[in-house]
Image (cartoon, rainbow, N blue to C red):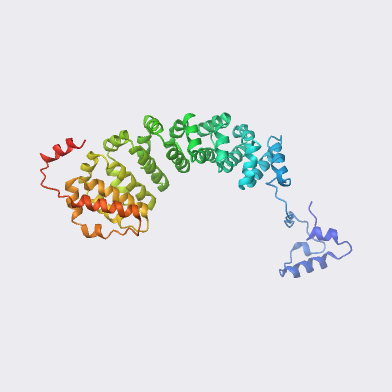
Amino acid sequence: MYSPHKHSYIQARSCGINPRVINRTVAKARDNIVIDGIDFEPPYLRLSSHLPYTPIGNVDITRRPCAFDRWALPKLRRELHSKDEDLQICAITTICDLCHDPEKAFDAIRLRIPNRLADLLLNSNEVIRERSLYALIVIANQADGKTAITQNKVILQNLAELIASEANDLVRLKANEVVYVVSEFWVTGCDLVENKFLTYLTDGIELETDEIIVMRLKALYHLMTTTSSISEVMELDGFGTCLDLLERDNVAVQAHALKCLQILTSSPVGQELFLENKILYKLNKLLNHKNPDVYTYATSLLMFGTVHTKVKIKCKKFVNIPKRLLELCNDRFTPYVQFFAIKALTNISEFPPIRMKVREKMDVVNNIIVDGDADLKRHKEILLKVLEKEPGVFDEEDIMPGYYQQNV
């Protein structure tokens, strides 16, 4: 049974003092005088006891004690495979904290700590799996860390297994984030492509959570740096997958799906798919999206898609596209949007009927503010030169098919 007295710890340390005096003193010090059954004589027995929480300075039970200077990481490395799982978790967390310092990160790479983490990626404890993946993310912020990860085949195999079959969403997210961070460096990105990570990233992406989808799309964007990698994504139906992801309500998913489509559309096969899938209907809507990232990448996708003559002709059906592009051309606070919009407007203005419509707004085109940007100034001059061309007379039935065949 609990002690019948209030402040039982103080009572035990203050022998010989009347318990009532101690109670009244503490109550006066707290300026909260409360009389309850324990103040009676004899006091009632308590059903519970509340002791004050007194934290100990310089002690963190979620971290391991660090040795001084160069002895810190070797000590933690030995503790990575301790039989005590709590000690393992604390050691990995401490390594994560230390490796935010680039010097410590290089020491960790030199001590082959990523290799020591390889088998922990498939540990039965999901906390250890998650912490190990986070440690790899921190180490992968260094170029040598990325290389150390791709050179270890066990790490790559375990990452592939986690991406494909991990049940815990957080662990699966961290595994995809490791791949994303490693893919940012083109050398290690090529290693990931050689180890079939394009397949792992595209397989079942529609079934994942929005956060994981965004992480996979970021990784795919960085991995599609060569013609062969783009062709491989095409074979995996990456184009159709990204189109399906545009139907999601998540803004980040839409934006990064558009970025991937931008890369895919830059290829000849992608331009054909751009026309076959009638993407202009979706872009006509996304160009007016409230989120800046969405309409920025939608404009860039339109810029690449309208290189094809067939797409330029199709744009005639969408009256709002030239109007929206003119608005974006004057968005002086986002030069990227201006650049994409000017280029897209130049492309579609090469089709004479659209050029006639755009020439009606020459005052808007002439007032495009480039703020001394040499590239924007050059592309604005190109747009003006295209608009100066006389459209001529066109017959929808006779002239258009000839123009269509001549420019395919």
Where, by quadrant of the figure, is residue 152 drawn? top right
Where, by quadrant of the figure, is residue 402 drawn? top left
> Which residue is drawn at the image coordinates 30% and 45% (left, top)?
303
Q: Where is residue 335 shown, x and y percent of the image?
A: 36, 54
Left or right of 252, for residue 399: left
Left or right of 305, for residue 18: right
Where, by quadrant of the figure, is residue 162 drawn? top right
Whether residue 324 can be seen here: no
Name the one closer to the observer, 380 or 219: 380
* Vertical comparison of 5 with 354: above or below: below
Q: Where is residue 47 shown, x and y percent of the image?
A: 74, 54
Q: Where is residue 217 shown, x and y percent of the image?
A: 43, 40
Left or right of 246, for residue 275: left
> Which residue is drawn at the image coordinates 25% and 51% (left, top)?
383
* Vertical comparison of 405 with 24: above or below: above
Q: Where is residue 188 shown, x and y percent of the image?
A: 51, 35
Q: Quick one: quadrant of the C terminus?
A: top left
Q: Residue furthest right?
A: 16
Name the one closer to the observer, 25 or 108: 108
Name the one closer to the observer, 77 or 359: 359
Whether residue 221 can be seen here: yes
* Vertical comparison of 332 with 279: above or below: below
Left or right of 80, for residue 288: left
Name the one closer to the observer, 36 or 193: 193
